[in-house]
Amino acid sequence: MDWTSNIQGLIGGGFIGLSAVFLMATLGRVAGISGILAGLFLDKPNRDELGWRLMFLLGLVSGPLLLMLFGGLGNAADSSQAVIGAPSGGIPLMLIAGLLVGIGTGVGSGCTSGHGVCGLARLSRRSLVATLVFLLAAMVVVFLTRHVIGGAV
């Protein structure tokens, strides 16, 4: 067993939790990515909130890019055993999946970061149900793609 990946995941999860607490403590906002993105592009943008929303999303995207720039530290590696690599289904499938996730966050009134990290921390029943649905759906998709359809996802 590779304990390095476990430690990196624990540290990454800690940073996600700290960023959620920091955003709530400083701005009184939930660190839900879909809500942050919607507030920037879909809803009527509030000029007072553009800065923090842009910085949050820039930080979200720049982290993995910095890892790749500095030689694939952590999960951003090129080997077949890597946790993150090139999309196995190709770019078109990845775009369709992203679109479906976006639709799902609209239907579910939030995403895994909003419900799973922030909502559960606030003991929200709605977030508990949403997170359980997210996890169940993910397990069903993995089972179907790996054992029924037989894909290498």
Image (cartoon, rainbow, N blue to C red):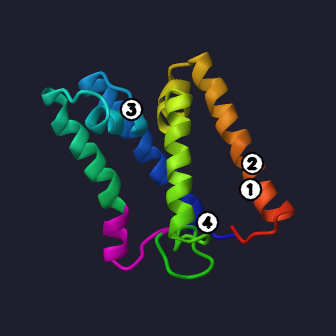
Q: Are marks 2 and 1 in contact (CB under 8 Å)?
A: yes
User: Quarter holding the C terminus?
Assistant: bottom right
Query: Which residue is the site of mark 1?
Result: 142
Q: Nearer the viewer, residue 121 or 47?
A: 47
Q: Mark 3 falls on what kind of element?
A: helix
Residue 38 in the image: state x and y as whole percent: 35, 35
At label 1, counting other C-alpha atoms closer than 10 Å, the crowd grade (few under 14, some 14-19, many 20 or more) is some
Tell me the amino acid under the disc marked 2: Met
Residue 127 in the image: state x and y as whole percent: 58, 24
Q: Which region is colored magenta?
A: 64-75
Q: Earlier in the sequence, mark 4 or mark 1?
A: 4
Tell me the amino acid under the disc marked 4: Trp
Q: Mark 2 falls on what kind of element?
A: helix
Q: Nearer the viewer, residue 120 or 145?
A: 145
Q: Are marks 2 and 3 in contact (CB under 8 Å)?
A: no
How far, Cα to Cα, is label 1 from label 3? 26 Å
Query: Which residue is the site of mark 3?
Result: 35
How far, Cα to Cα, is label 4 from label 1? 24 Å
Query: Which residue is the site of mark 2?
Result: 139
State the image quarter where residue 134 is shown.
top right
Q: Earlier in the sequence, mark 4 or mark 3?
A: 4
Q: Which residue sits at x=51%, y=35%?
A: 105
The answer to whether residue 119 is left or right of residue 149 is: left
